Amino acid sequence: MDVPAPFFNGLKVVELASVLAGPAAGMFFAELGAQVLKVENKLAGGDVTRHWKVPEEDPAASVSAYYASVNWGKKSWICDLTHPEDYQQLIQYLKDADIVISNYRPATAQKLGVSYEQLQEYNPRLIFGQIYGMGKDDDTPAFDIVLQAEAGFLSMTGEPGRPLVKMPVALIDLLAAHQLKEGLLLALLRRERSGKGAFVSVSLLEAAIASLANQAANWLMAGHLPQPMGSLHPNIAPYGDVFYTADDKPIVLGVGTERQFQTLCRHLGLSEYCTDERFCTNTARVRHRPALQEALASAIRLRYRDELIAQLRAADVPCASVRNMQEVFEHSLAQNMILETIDETGRTARCVRTTAFEIR
């Protein structure tokens, strides 16, 4: 994949944000050529994620892998905005900036002099992106696990009868970052036409709720209350089912059409299931999922993973090997998405791009 062109050359972005959602939005602009200044709180030792390290990391390194994951391509400035000199330096920089990304609580921003209303006085064309947690009128601390619980995700994850589990990536932060980016891009487009700045805001909770998709509609339209199903799908079968092959390797199926199910059955020697009243339609398969899983598991256990995956993919049956992170980055597409930079201590920092699109 080609790296997107530097569409935002000359664009100045100021990031008054920490942790994940705001920095992810800032990195999007950095990847596309913008000049991004990341303002970090000196009194707190900088962005808190600088110190969120896994045991394998060098404890002496100034930044963690977590921090590096969403701060590529930025210039960091660790300062104290309660200090008049630092504050005035920021204001001078903001006078010709284009975008501010902030996740300060409103009262804190007002106290520091960096609210939208205060900064707009210096720069009327400024586009200000604000991230809230639970909403603009709720100051409840909103880390990702809190949002996963509040937005219903936590109630659906895990396996039946076992403890609930969170998603292993702070996905709600990333969803909020995407929502904010869309709003900021629209505000940039409007400013090109009108010359006016804008205030763009998103809350983590609303971004999470907006992403409930079919799970929300299942409840709103059918009264279906989602329950933990592991990797299974409430509407489709076999979809998300994990099976083990003869070489004890996990694979997953994502069968979404009748044709795909019929092709799967033929390749597994289960053609009679195509006309079996328990499995001949998707609705029937969802109702008789345990019996279907048992039959598929027995047939797949007789086949070797690589051979079976190759045959099913050649027949357009959605399936995959369950890869760990090492195996993911052995893939050529994943290799092409790696970004490298030199951190503040001269070490090489690596992360993946937030931009996964091409424009031609």
Image: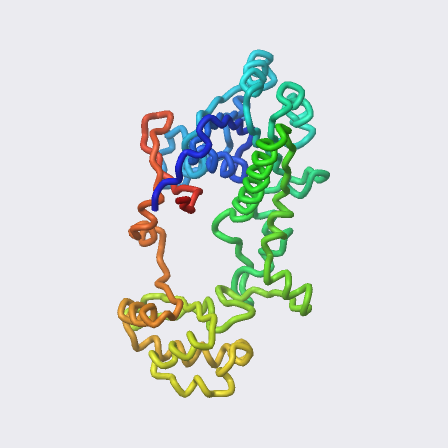
Vertical side of 48 occupied by 334: above or below: below
Whether residue 187 is visible to the viewer of this picture, yes or no, is yes
Vertical side of 98 occupied by 150: above or below: below
- At x 35%, y 79%, the residue is 299
Q: Quadrant of residue 58?
A: top left
- List x then y, in percent, for residue 147: 61, 48
- At x 58%, y 61%, the residue is 156
Residue lying furthest front: 193
Q: How is the image coloured?
A: rainbow
Whether residue 102 is visible to the viewer of this picture, yes or no, is no
Residue lying furthest right: 137
- List x then y, in percent, for residue 101: 57, 32
- At x 65%, y 21%, the residue is 113
Q: Is residue 263 left or right of residue 122?
A: left
Q: Is residue 326 left or right of residue 185?
A: left
Q: Quadrant of the C terminus?
A: top left
Q: Is residue 335 left or right of residue 63?
A: left
Vertical side of 213 occupied by 91: above or below: above
- At x 51%, y 47%, the residue is 170
Looking at the image, how many numbered discs can be counted on the residues? Answer: 0
- List x then y, in percent, for residue 185: 55, 38
